[in-house]
């Protein structure tokens, strides 16, 4: 049996040029934008060995849905088929739970861990999401720290990218930390 060649393309979004790699009608990787399109292509090639190609209809539909999501539409990405070959069972469970988080909503790492059976799994949830091979499709940006704090986002641009994606979706997020958060209450400036 000969496997089809893995191909990739970049596509413009509100957060920059994202990338998608596929084999047949199955997505094998997605990436958020790097500093330049060339760097985004290099990251996809490094992860997949893909060659630049022209998307088939199923992949074009996936691109359209991801683009719509990143333009603020409540696009459903559940129809997109991803290749989960080689992903460990725990990460698969994390991705399965994360993929069900609705557009514009968030869960905490602890919430995901509880759905997997134990709040103590929260750190492992974060590690699995840090290795997410399908950002956007598996919306790891919708998983936040306790009390809605924006912590740990391994994609290019870090927390700034996460905040932008959540803002586009209309998610209610905790206030960003201020300069005075660590001061005792008596010394904080008055409004």
Image (tube, grey):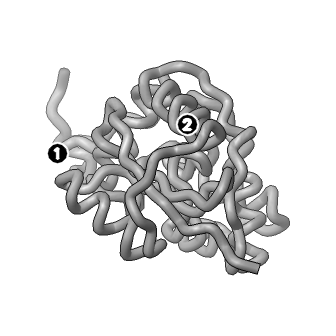
Mark 1, Cα crowd under 10 Å, few <14 / some 14-19 / many 20+, is few
Which quarter of the rendered picture does the N terminus lie within? bottom right
Who's the residue at 69% across and 71% down the image? Answer: 91
Residue extending furthest front?
2
In terms of sequence position, does the residue under pointer 1 or pointer 2 come before the other?
A: 2
Q: Of 161 and 118, which appears nearest the observer?
A: 161
56 or 170, nearer to the observer: 56
Identify whether 135 is placed above or below 87: above
Closest to the observer, 179 or 54: 54
Q: Is residue 110 above or below residue 163?
A: below
Q: Residue at x 57, y 30 (%)?
A: 65
Residue 120 seen = no
Q: Is residue 4 left or right of residue 113?
A: left
Badge 1 marks a residue whose secondary structure is: loop
Q: Which residue is mark 2?
A: 60
- Estimate the x, y position of residue 150 in percent, counting from the top left: 41, 49
User: Does 166 appear above or below 137?
Assistant: above
**Where in the figure is residue 19, as x and y percent of width and height?**
40, 51
Q: Which mark is residue 54?
A: none
Residue at 38% in and 70% down: 45
Residue 29 left/right relative to 164: right
- Residue 4 location (% of width, % of height): 63, 68
Specify whether 5 is left or right of 83: left
Mark 2 Cα shell of 10 Å, populated few (<14), some (14-19), many (≥20): some
Q: Does residue 99 show up?
A: yes
Circle on res. 179:
1
């Amino acid at each position: 049996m000969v496997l089809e060649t893995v191909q990739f393309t970049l596509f413009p979004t509100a957060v920059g040029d994202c990338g998608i790699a596929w084999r047949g009608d199955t997505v094998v990787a997605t990436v958020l934008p790097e500093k330049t399109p060339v760097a985004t292509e290099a990251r996809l090639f490094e992860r997949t060995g893909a060659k630049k190609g022209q998307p088939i209809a199923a992949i074009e539909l996936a691109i359209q849905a991801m683009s719509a999501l990143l333009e603020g539409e409540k696009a459903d990405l559940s129809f997109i088929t991803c290749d989960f070959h080689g992903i460990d069972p725990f990460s698969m469970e994390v991705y399965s739970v994360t993929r069900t988080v609705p557009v514009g909503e968030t869960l905490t790492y602890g919430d995901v861990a509880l759905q997997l059976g134990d709040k103590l799994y929260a750190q492992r949830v974060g590690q699995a999401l840090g290795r997410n091979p399908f950002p956007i499709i598996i919306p790891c940006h919708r998983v936040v720290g306790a009390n809605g704090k924006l912590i740990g986002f391994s994609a290019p641009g870090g927390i700034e990218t996460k905040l932008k994606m959540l803002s586009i979706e209309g998610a209610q997020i905790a206030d960003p930390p201020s300069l005075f958060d660590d001061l005792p209450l008596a010394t904080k400036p008055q409004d």
